[in-house]
Image: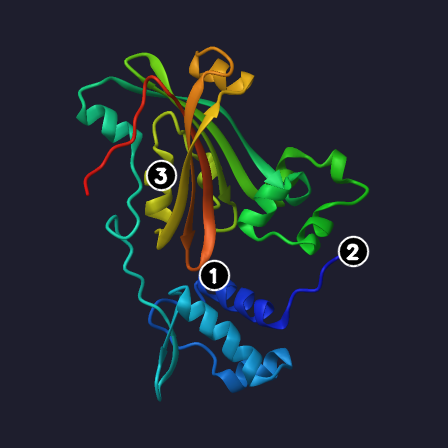
Amino acid sequence: MTKTIPAYQRIKNAILDNIHSGKWQAGNAISTEMALAEEFSVSRMTVNRALKELSEERVLERRQGSGTFVAQQQFNHTFVEVRNIAEDLKSANRDYEAKVVSKRAITADMLDDTLRRKFGIDDATISASTGDNANSMSVEKTSETAVLYEVKIIHFADGQPIQFEERWVDAAKVPAFIEQDFSVVNTSDYLIAKSPLERGSYTIRALAAPDEIAEFLQIAPQSPTLVLRRQTYSAGQVVTFVKMWHAGDRYQFSGEL
């Protein structure tokens, strides 16, 4: 059964769509609470909740007596520091190389539950992408209906695999992502340039390497690895989710306090 999207969430989605499409740009005033209440046939309390949440997410800025505006985001590496393995290795005077294992467009019906939750993709979106002809879609049609792009890359240091990257990107926010040659272009650098990041979250876990990962990293199956999972946001929504697998005896994370 398709879940009904709450009214406040529909309002948030509509505001975000207007921002991502460029209709409302940084510094622009958005529609008033009263206008939004009339447009969505809801109470001003419901509108207020949507605006309050987007303000807390730093997408909007509410100014007493003036209205609500698209926030002027201060996107920079101080706010979200995204490490670039290519630059890290080159600065350590090590030879760097990237090999693209695969890249593809993913339609909504192909998603697992984890990716659906990460990117906020609902049942209605999945239903819209399925049908009698779902299994016979052409490559062109698949690209047109893609909701995510997926790329898998092995990163090498001095000829030895040191990191395996699995990345998913919102196709609507970064439509040209899949066209890039990621043996030359760094994924993080490209995303920062095309969809500046406002915040992110990550976890690092020690895991035994599954067979596929072990093969890519050229280590024995079940060998220890360090796995960094990171999701980053632009204009209040997840723009990319990545899993980076590192051979445990070849990589370490460090920093300064």
Relative vertical location of residue 70 with respect to residue 1 in this rendering, above or below: below
The image shows residue 121 at horizontal and vertical percentages of 61, 52
**Residue 225 as seen in the image, left or right of residue 256:** right
Marked residue nearer the N-terminal end (1 or 2): 2
Inter-mark Cα distance, 2 to 3: 37 Å
Marked residue nearer the N-terminal end (1 or 3): 1
Q: Write down the residue under mark 1.
A: 21
Marked residue nearer the N-terminal end (2 or 3): 2
Q: Are marks 2 and 3 in contact (CB under 8 Å)?
A: no
Q: Residues within 10 Å of mark 1 (few under 14, many from 20)?
A: few
Q: Residue furthest bottom?
A: 65
Identify the residue shown where x is 25% and y is 48%. 77
Q: Write down the residue under mark 3.
A: 188
Q: Write down the residue under mark 2.
A: 1
Quarter residue 95 falls in: top left
Quarter residue 234 falls in: bottom left
Q: Residues within 10 Å of mark 2 (few under 14, many from 20)?
A: few
The image shows residue 43 at horizontal and vertical percentages of 60, 84
In this view of the protein, which residue sits in the foreground, 108 or 241?
241
Rendering colour mode: rainbow
Quarter residue 36 falls in: bottom right
Inter-mark Cα distance, 1 to 2: 30 Å
The image shows residue 231 at horizontal and vertical percentages of 44, 45
The image shows residue 15 at horizontal and vertical percentages of 50, 68
Amino acid on which the number 3 mark rests in the picture: Ser
Quadrant in which the C terminus is drawn: top left
